[in-house]
């Protein structure tokens, strides 16, 4: 008898297919052979485990009772769910009814609140944006003034002309720019530059100090075209005083035609002045 | 960087000594010429000329040096001749005014002809300066300059300024003489007090504005038909004749209502024409004179 036969006998016994366990002779053999003994022990352990896991099939009565119990449990659960829903519905109903009466008012109130919040937030944003824009505009304006001043100081007459043209688009609030333009008006060797400066100054603020400076410049100009342009510019101001007229007529280079125009439009005997 | 500096007063005297000058057969004229090398011939030159009296003629050419030719007419000679003074035996003292009344007699002396030319020429880093402050000499200056040179020309009295085919930036001031510039491609700013001005553009420069001003005289300007110019005209007393394909419109009319205590006036005013988009300004100003604006 080999190992396989002994193990098979053991399995048959454990499985109930053999009434007798291993014979005493076979047991002696098993004890003498450790390997065989180990295998027999493994089979016994395995069979014990299998026995633990084995579940007996329910009987027909048990099955019937089970389904009866299941049916009771399901119906009980359904009843319980309905009761809960009913309870919840009952507890909410009065509040909704009450709210329903004031719903339009609440909606209006909600709209007002949302609108108010939006307006407030927007106002803040607009205000911030306006502030930022103002700061940015000031910076751009300052930059424009710097560029204009730089161009007005160039050696090239064409570049100075370009600078004066550039200054037309810059605010004349900056005193440095106005002073620089007046310096060109009184001292630039090019009549074209001086003439262009007159055009720029015509866009600036009209005040007594500026009028005095224009009168002063008119008393120095030699080019009749510039003289005429300054006379045009003076039309934007109030009438000239006698002293101012004397200052203008002190210019020995004042063109006769320009002098006539000044007398015609600014002399005290003029009906409209 | 190499700096080339030249004082022409000395130069001219040296040149006289070496007989490298060409002296006119006319005793009243002295003529010299010089070929001036630039510090960097590959860069554009800036030529600055200032004369008290005479004429400046500048012509662009293909070379890389500045060729200078100066001819001097003695104004004293002209005056003396016109007043019937013997120039060889200079005995008349009238023309020297009060200072001449006590002048020692020149009887028996011969007048020594001046052969020097008082012109200062200086070159530094391609900037050439040519000046003469001598009010007694009328100098006719003829320059040949590289095409791409820039010019700044000023003459107080005399025969004015003429420029041909110089493509750089041009500035001209001629108090009494006429101004003519042809083949202009850069910006030009020109001003004359009492003479006419004729400017012919080959191209109208868009980088910088151009301006032509005549106090009393006509302006004749010719533009390429494709020039993109915003032509701004100020003309107090004169006519405007236009051949360009753009309409002139009044843009600056001074009118003040009597309600503010001011009389309503319109003085001169400004007219504007937008030619081909008007990308750069061309300012035309005259006090008394006509304007001829042509297209080619």
Image (cartoon, coloured by chain):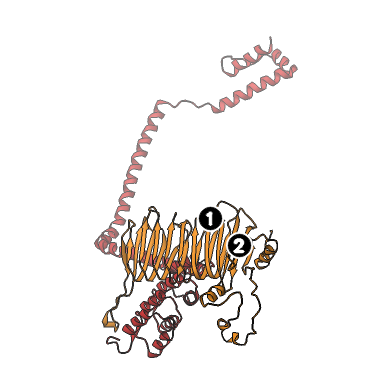
Chain colours: A red, B orange
- Residue sitting at 35 percent across and 39 percent down? A74
Considering every residue shown, the one lying at the far front of the view is B108
In this view, the mark in front (2 or 1) = 1
Q: Dot 1, crowdedness within 10 Å: few (<14), some or many (≥20)?
A: many
Q: Which mark is residue B60?
A: 1
Q: Which mark is residue B127?
A: 2
- Residue sitting at 73 percent across and 18 percent down? A31
- Foreground residue among B132 and B244: B132
A177 relative position to A4: left or right: left
On screen, residue B30 above or below B228: below
- Foreground residue among A144 and B105: B105
> Residue A188 location in percent, x, y?
49, 73
Q: What secondary structure is marked by label 1? A: strand
> Residue A224 location in percent, x, y?
40, 76
Badge 2: chain ID? B
On screen, residue A264 above or below B165: below
How far apart in space, not on screen, are marks 2 and 1 (Cα)? 16 Å
A37 relative position to A138: left or right: right
């Amino acid at each position: 008898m080999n190992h396989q036969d002994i193990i098979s006998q053991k399995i048959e016994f454990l499985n109930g297919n053999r009434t007798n366990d291993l014979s005493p002779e076979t047991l002696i053999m098993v004890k003498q052979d450790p390997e065989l003994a180990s295998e027999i022990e493994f089979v016994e352990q395995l069979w014990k485990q299998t026995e633990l896991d084995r579940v007996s099939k329910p009987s027909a009565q048990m099955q019937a009772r089970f389904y009866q119990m299941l049916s009771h449990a399901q119906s009980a659960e359904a009843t319980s769910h309905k009761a809960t829903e009913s309870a919840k519905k009952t507890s909410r109903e009065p509040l909704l009814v009450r709210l329903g009466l004031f719903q339009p008012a609440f909606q209006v109130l909600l709209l007002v609140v949302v609108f108010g919040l939006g307006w407030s937030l927007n106002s803040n944003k607009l205000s911030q944006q306006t502030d930022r824009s103002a700061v940015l505009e000031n910076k751009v304006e300052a930059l424009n003034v710097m560029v204009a001043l730089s161009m007005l100081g160039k050696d090239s007459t064409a570049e100075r002309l370009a600078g004066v043209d550039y200054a037309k688009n810059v605010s004349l609030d900056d005193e440095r720019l106005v002073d620089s333009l007046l310096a060109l008006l009184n001292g630039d060797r090019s009549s074209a530059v001086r003439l262009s400066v007159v055009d720029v100054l015509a866009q600036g603020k009209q005040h007594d100090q500026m009028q005095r400076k224009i009168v002063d410049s008119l008393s120095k100009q030699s080019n009749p075209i510039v003289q005429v342009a300054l006379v045009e510019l003076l039309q934007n101001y109030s009438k000239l005083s006698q002293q101012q007229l004397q200052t203008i007529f002190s210019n020995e280079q004042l063109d006769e035609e320009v002098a006539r125009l000044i007398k015609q439009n600014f002399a005290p005997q003029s009906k409209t002045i | 960087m190499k700096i080339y500096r030249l004082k022409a007063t000395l130069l001219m005297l040296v040149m006289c000594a070496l007989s490298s000058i060409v002296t006119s057969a006319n005793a009243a004229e002295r003529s010299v010429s010089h070929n001036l090398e630039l510090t960097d011939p590959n860069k554009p030159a800036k030529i600055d000329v200032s004369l008290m009296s005479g004429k400046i003629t500048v012509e662009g050419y293909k070379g890389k040096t500045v060729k200078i030719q100066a001819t001097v007419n003695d104004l004293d000679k002209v005056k003396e001749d016109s007043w019937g003074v013997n120039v060889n035996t200079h005995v008349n003292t009238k023309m020297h005014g009060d200072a001449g009344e006590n002048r020692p007699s020149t009887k028996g002396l011969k007048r020594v002809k001046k052969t020097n030319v008082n012109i200062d020429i200086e070159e530094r880093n391609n900037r050439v300066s040519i000046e003469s402050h001598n009010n007694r000499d009328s100098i006719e200056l003829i320059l040949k300059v590289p095409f791409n040179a820039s010019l700044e020309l000023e003459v107080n009295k005399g025969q004015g300024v003429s420029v041909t085919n110089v493509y750089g930036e041009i500035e001209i001031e001629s108090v009494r003489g006429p101004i003519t510039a042809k083949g202009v491609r850069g910006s030009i700013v020109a001003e004359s007090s009492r003479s006419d001005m004729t400017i012919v553009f080959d191209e109208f420069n868009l980088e910088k504005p151009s301006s032509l001003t005549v106090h009393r005289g006509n302006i004749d300007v010719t533009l390429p038909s494709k020039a993109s110019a915003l032509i701004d005209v100020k003309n107090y007393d004169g006519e405007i004749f236009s051949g360009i394909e753009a309409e002139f419109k009044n843009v600056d009319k001074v009118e003040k209502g009597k309600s503010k205590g001011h009389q309503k006036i319109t003085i001169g005013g400004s007219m504007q024409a937008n030619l081909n988009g008007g990308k750069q300004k061309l300012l035309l100003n005259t006090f008394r004179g006509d304007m001829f604006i042509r297209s080619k």
